[in-house]
Structure formats: C-alpha cells, structure tokens
Image (cartoon, rainbow, N blue to C red):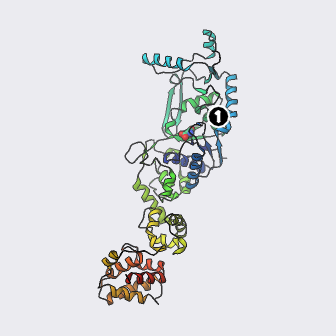
C-alpha cells in the first residue's frame, strides 16, 4: 500500500507565481506518481499579510492548472489550539522553556557577540539549569516567549533528494522561539506540527527553506518522530539569469491565462523548469505524473524562457482536437468583443489559425473577420483592387452565387477566374482577401471563404466593390 503524502503549503500573501506553481506541480505529481495523497495547506499565520483574496487567487490558479488536491485546504489559523497544546506538552516535558529575555538584552548580547567577531545567537540564559544556577527570577509583568531546546552538540543532517547530503552543526542553531509573548506559535514550529499531524512523507519545497530544515528536523526528533524526506527545489531565474523580477515571470500564473496560454502548456513548461525526462519536450499532465521523479530534478537553478513557452503553447495547440481547442478559444473571442455564435464553428477557425499564432489571444485577434465584417479603408482597398483586378473580382462574386460551397470548388474557380482575366492568382486573391477579411494576410483563401460562408462573402465583396 502506498503511503506517499505530499503537501503544498503556500502563504496567502500574494498571487501564485511561477516558482510557487512549479512547487505545487512537483508535489502534486509526486503524490500522483505514487498513488499517494496531495494535501493543500494554507499557511496564513502572518495575519498582517494574509488575505482571503490571495487564498482565492491560489485556489483559482491551482484549479486552472488542474492541480487537484485530495485533502484540505487546511488553514493554520484554525489550528491554533492544536499548536498551543503541543507547546504546553513540550514545556511540560522539558523540550521547551520560557525565556524572559528582553529585546534590549538581546540587542546588547548581539552587539557584544558581533564585536567579538562571533555569530550572534541566543546564549541559552533562560534554560532551566541556568536559571537555577544563576538564580534568575522572571521579571514582573513581562510575558515570556517559549523557546525550543535545541540539541547542544553534534550535527543535524539529511539526504536532500535534490541537493544531496546537507549538514548543519547544532552549535550554529540557537534555541528557536516557538511561541511569541502573546502565545501565538511561530512559523517553523507550525510547519513541523502540521507535517506530523498531516503525516507528510515528502516535503517538496523551494530551496529558500533549506535554512529552516535543520531546526525543523530537531523539532521532529524532539517530538519523537523521524522527519519526512526533503526535496528542496532550486529557484527559477528570469530570462536574464537574474532573480525573477516583476518583468520576468514574477507575475501571477493567471496572467498567463489572460495572455492566452493553455494550462496544458503551462504545466508542461513549468515541469521542464529544472526537470527532464530524456528528450521529451511536449507532454501532458498525465504523462508528467507518470514520469516524475525527485532524482531527476536538477540541483541548479533553471531559467524562464519566453520563446520556449511560446513553442510549448503552439505544440499543445497543434495536438489538441478541433472541438476542444475551439472551446478554449471561445472565452478569448468573447473577451475580444466577438460573438462566437455570429460566425463559424470556433473549432474550425482554430484549426485554420493555429499554425500562425502563438497564443489564444493572438488567435482571437486573428479571428476577427470570421465573426464580424471588416471595414477596410478606401485606401487599403484601392491598393489591391485595381482596374486590372476589378472585373475578375466582380466575376468571381457572380460565380459564387451558385458554386458548390467547398474548398475544392472554390479553389478551382478562383484559379480559372484569374486566368480568364489574364491575372496571376495573387492579383485576384489579394483584393479578395482585403474585401472579405480586411487584410491581405489570411490562411488559405479557399478555406477562409468556406468558413465565412457564401452569403457573408458575397455581401462583403459587394460592399467593397461599391466603395
Ligand atoms: N509557506 C511557505 C511558503 O510559502 C512554505 C513552507 C513549506 O513548504 O514548508 O514559502
């Protein structure tokens, strides 16, 4: 029986950006790969910065990417009683102790240590044995913090599934504050209680948490448990190799939805940021989940690449069935102010346009003339509709009245009509494109005409000729 349990634990202080989405994707995929459970936990204890809008934004982005969770969302703010109970228990068992050191005293200690060239760290003065030895008396009217009693010697080590063996000397770690003077638990402590209670077996998270891990491991062990497996995923860098900035990918995943990327492409793109499966470049979520392994995550940072994202999006558009791609195009047509019911089947339109565009936004933009009559300017018409081509355009408009409305019949007739008037095909095709589509750049003219429909085509040519 599989016991893999992973979690994604975002802090709802903003939208879900690329790095966060990739962490979620990896945690999701690992659970799926092993038939395990994927838990969603909202780490909302930073009350000043957490918002319900951010929670919503994270849930929306996960839903868009198709990252379904099996348990949760658990909210840390709803688990306060549990954290308090664990703290009380740790105090009772001597695993934690009260510390009354004031900020002024801490500052004083810190400057002294720094002056002596030492790393500033709490000196354990309120550890029970020191209190007894020094006869310390808790000051009146001051609320203490609770500190975890960190092991004094030795090392804390783990075999990171991405970064390999990592080791910290306990001498580097001071006694962590696990509850503030008002009794609220602190971040590193809540994470451990949650990961224990939620029986998490694999912690997959950003490598900005590597420094928290030794402290968390010590708390796991103090509570009588072996820690889970850790896999710290390197950061995603911007196109320029610098930290992701607002201009390079540090935007909400949902902005990619707005920009017309398919969620399938986004998942594929995110999966390839720092992970590879042989030479496979284009794949779906299901394949990804079947292939995903922590050992194949690269220990060095990956780079965001817009060209790659465009390419992957195009590949997914090409692989998608017409009706599915058409259904995806519909909301973008609507956002572009078009009525999808006022023209041809969006699936057919998508098939015709997909090799020429990079995103669904570009596709909707290129699809205007299928859903609304163009109004080419007189100058534009005059550029293409010359004295030489005008009779041929008139002739084809007449022929269109009773021609079988198929690509083959239209294609044949276009060529013969051009020939009849002594024109090269483009000399007829260009003015027709401008009259019917408003632009000389369209996919294959016969296909475009078929989709626009006989009546609309004839009406547009007539309007143009009357100009
Ligand atoms: N809440 C943390 C964050 O958003 C993640 C904590 C964890 O994964 O352990 O960075």
Q: Residues within 10 Å of mark 1 (few under 14, many from 20)?
A: many
Residue positioned 59% across, 28% down in the render: 218
Q: Quadrant of ligand 1?
A: top right
On the image, numbered disc 1 is attached to which residue? Answer: 193
Residue pictured at 44% horizontal, 87% vertical: 400
Q: Where 162 falls versus 411 (above or below)?
A: above
- From the Cβ of disc 1, is ligand 1 less than 8 Å away? no
The residue positioned 55% from the left and 70% from the top of the image is 323
State which quadrant residue 394 falls in: bottom left
**Residue 415, located in which quarter of the rendered image?**
bottom left
Q: Nearer the viewer, residue 67 or 337?
A: 337
Identify the secondary structure beneath mark 1. Answer: helix
Pick the residue in front: 335 or 158.
335
- How many marks the image carries: the answer is 1
Residue at 47% x, 66% y is 364
Relative side of 375 to 143, left or right:
left
Q: Is residue 41 above or below residue 290?
A: above
Q: Give the image location of residue 152, x and y in percent.
A: 56, 20
The answer to whether one can see residue 120 in this image is yes
Estimate the x, y position of residue 445 in percent, counting from the top left. 40, 78
Of 148 and 30, nearer the camera is: 148
Residue 5 visible in rendering: no
Q: In the image, 28: left or right of 384? A: right
* Quadrant of the rendering where the C terminus is positioned: bottom left
Quadrant in the rendering for residue 115: top left
Q: Position of residue 24 (x, y in %)?
A: 55, 47
Residue 32 falls left or right of residue 357: right
Q: Position of residue 386 (x, y in %)?
A: 30, 82
């Amino acid at each position: 029986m599989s016991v893999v349990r992973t979690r994604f634990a975002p802090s709802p202080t903003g939208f879900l950006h690329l790095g966060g989405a990739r962490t979620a994707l990896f945690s999701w995929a690992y659970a799926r790969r092993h038939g395990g459970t994927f838990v969603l936990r909202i780490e909302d204890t930073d009350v000043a910065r957490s918002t319900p809008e951010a929670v919503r934004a994270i849930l929306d982005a996960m839903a868009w990417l198709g990252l379904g969770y099996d348990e949760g969302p658990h909210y840390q703010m709803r688990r306060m009683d549990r954290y308090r109970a664990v703290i009380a228990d740790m105090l009772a068992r001597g695993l934690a102790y009260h510390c009354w050191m004031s900020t002024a005293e801490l500052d004083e200690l810190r400057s002294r240590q720094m002056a002596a060239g030492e790393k500033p760290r709490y000196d354990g003065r309120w550890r029970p044995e020191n209190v007894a030895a020094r006869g310390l008396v808790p000051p009146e009217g001051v609320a203490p913090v609770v500190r975890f009693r960190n092991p004094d010697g030795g090392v804390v080590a783990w075999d990171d599934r991405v970064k390999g063996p990592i080791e910290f000397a306990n001498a580097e770690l001071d006694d962590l504050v696990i509850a503030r003077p008002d009794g609220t638990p602190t971040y590193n402590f809540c994470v451990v209680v949650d990961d224990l209670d939620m029986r998490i077996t694999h912690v997959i998270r950003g490598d900005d948490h590597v420094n928290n891990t030794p402290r968390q491991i010590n708390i796991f062990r103090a509570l009588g448990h072996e820690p889970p497996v850790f896999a710290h995923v390197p950061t995603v860098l911007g196109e320029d190799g610098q930290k992701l900035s607002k201009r390079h990918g540090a935007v909400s995943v949902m902005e990619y939805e707005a920009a017309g990327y398919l969620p399938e492409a986004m998942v594929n793109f995110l999966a390839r940021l720092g992970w590879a499966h042989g030479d496979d470049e284009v794949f779906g979520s299901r394949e990804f989940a079947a292939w995903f392994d922590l050992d194949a995550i690269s220990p060095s940072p990956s780079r965001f690449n817009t060209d790659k994202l465009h390419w992957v999006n195009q590949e997914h558009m090409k692989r998608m069935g017409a009706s599915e791609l058409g259904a995806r195009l519909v909301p973008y047509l609507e956002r572009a102010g078009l009525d999808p019911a006022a023209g041809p089947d969006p699936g057919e339109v998508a098939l015709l346009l997909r090799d020429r565009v990079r995103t669904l936004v570009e596709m909707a933009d290129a699809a205007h003339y299928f859903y609304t009559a163009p109004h080419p300017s007189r100058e534009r018409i005059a550029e293409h509709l010359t004295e030489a081509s005008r009779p041929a355009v008139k002739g084809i408009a007449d022929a269109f009245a009773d021609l079988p409305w198929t690509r083959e019949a239209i294609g044949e007739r276009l060529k013969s009509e051009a020939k009849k008037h002594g024109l090269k095909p483009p000399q007829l095709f260009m003015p027709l494109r401008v009259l019917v589509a408003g632009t000389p750049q369209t996919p294959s003219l016969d296909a475009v005409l078929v989709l626009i429909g006989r009546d609309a085509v004839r009406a547009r040519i007539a309007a143009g000729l009357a100009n």
